[in-house]
Amino acid sequence: MISTELTRMLGLRYPIVSAPMASVSGGWLAGAVSEAGGLGMIGVGSNTPTGWISEQAELASPKGAFGFGLMCWALERRPDLLDAVLAAQPSAVSLSFGDPAPYVERVRDAGATVFCQVQDAAGARRAIEGGVQVLVAQGTDAGGHTGEVGTLPLMQKVLRIGEASNLPVLAAGGIATGVGIAGVLAMGAAGAWIGTRFAATEEALGSDEAKRRILEADETSTVHTRVFDITQGIPWPEEFPGRALRNAFTEKWHGRERELEENLPAARAELDEARERGDYSQMYVYAGQAAGMVEEVPPAGELVKKLAEDAERQLRRCCDSVLGPSL
Ligand SMILES: Cc1cc2nc3c(=O)[nH]c(=O)nc-3n(C[C@H](O)[C@H](O)[C@H](O)COP(=O)(O)O)c2cc1C
């Protein structure tokens, strides 16, 4: 058993969170993770229909504590997303990528714990001022949209800020094994927030081909890029490019964003056609550097248990070998 502030706050068996991933983490995945003793999060995108939110909550809620991940910049245009999320009575809501302050009070009043992914110290301070209850330090190693600072330096900075305000800090970005979880717990994290590793599980919503691409990828296979958002016209703030697997589309356009904007209709048609064909040599698969540690597509519940057992073993081994037997 591993007990941290996170497990105590939410009554979890393990300090493991399956990250919200729009189009990838639905209620089936979140429910499997929660049932196994972690916290399963459902990802809500800027175009997610509100009906989908209640359907996914019905899948997850019988299995234990679950949550939703929202993007603040999307809530500015789609306040209905927050209404639908709160109506589903989650235990946790993450408000990331923008200023959480306008939404925190409603979430807390609804009885959910407010998480916020932060990408630098300024973001961590803003989140605390806004009233969030758990900080998630999301390093640039992460899959999906993220900032520029690596998980290790970011964690050291955000842990200090969290400690000064008495807030737990989770680590996100690059964690895919029990050894990785043990590492961040040893640093002082209250848990690990894991995306890419869970994107390659049976219950993840991505296609089999997208999962196969993650399996094939190694730690050098990703690129931090805005080309997919530019092409689709998704108004992600520029400070958060998305980390995705490199493919022919990123090879063609990454670094040539001005030309891409000048050729938008043709590039958009190319991407749309690739999506129809299921052609991932052009289409995006958002994934982080931890893809290099993904070797199989297991059921999510088995993965949670294995990660937790491996983390515990690593922590014990570390205490014994580094500190020696205590008197
Ligand atoms: C496919 C994918 C989609 C994501 N979508 C979201 C999202 O909708 N909302 C969000 O807050 N974070 C999103 N993220 C970021 C994750 O919450 C998390 O920070 C990240 O996956 C952690 O790094 P890792 O992938 O190395 O485990 C996404 C990540 C991935 C891989």
Image (tube, rainbow, N blue to C red):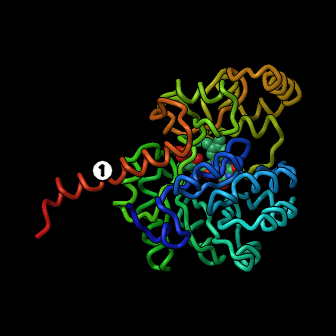
What percent of the width, then of the height, locates residue 273? 84, 22
What percent of the width, then of the height, locates residue 50? 86, 55
Q: Closest to the observer: 186 or 208?
A: 208
Give the quarter of the figure containing the C terminus: bottom left
Q: Is residue 240 visible?
A: no
What percent of the width, then of the height, locates residue 294? 48, 33
Task: State whether residue 240 is above or below residue 260.
Answer: below
Q: Closest to the observer: 14 or 196?
A: 14
Disc 1 residue lies near ligand 1 with CB under 8 A: no
Q: Is residue 88 left or right of residue 205?
A: right
Farthest left residue? 327
Q: Tag count in the figure?
A: 1
What percent of the width, then of the height, locates residue 56? 76, 51
The residue at 69%/34% (across/down) is 206
Q: Which element type, helix, strand or loop, lies under badge 1?
A: helix
Figure quadrant of residue 81: bottom right
- What residue does disc 1 label? 314
Give the quarter of the figure containing the N terminus: bottom left
Estimate how packed mark 1 is, as few (under 14), some (14 to 19) or many (20 or more) residues with alpha carbons within 10 Å: some
Task: State whether residue 77 is above or below residue 206.
Answer: below
Figure quadrant of residue 229: top right
The residue at 51%/75% (across/down) is 167
Q: Amino acid at mark 1?
A: Gln
Q: Closest to the observer: 57 or 263?
A: 57
The residue at 59%/25% (across/down) is 212
Figure quadrant of residue 24: top right
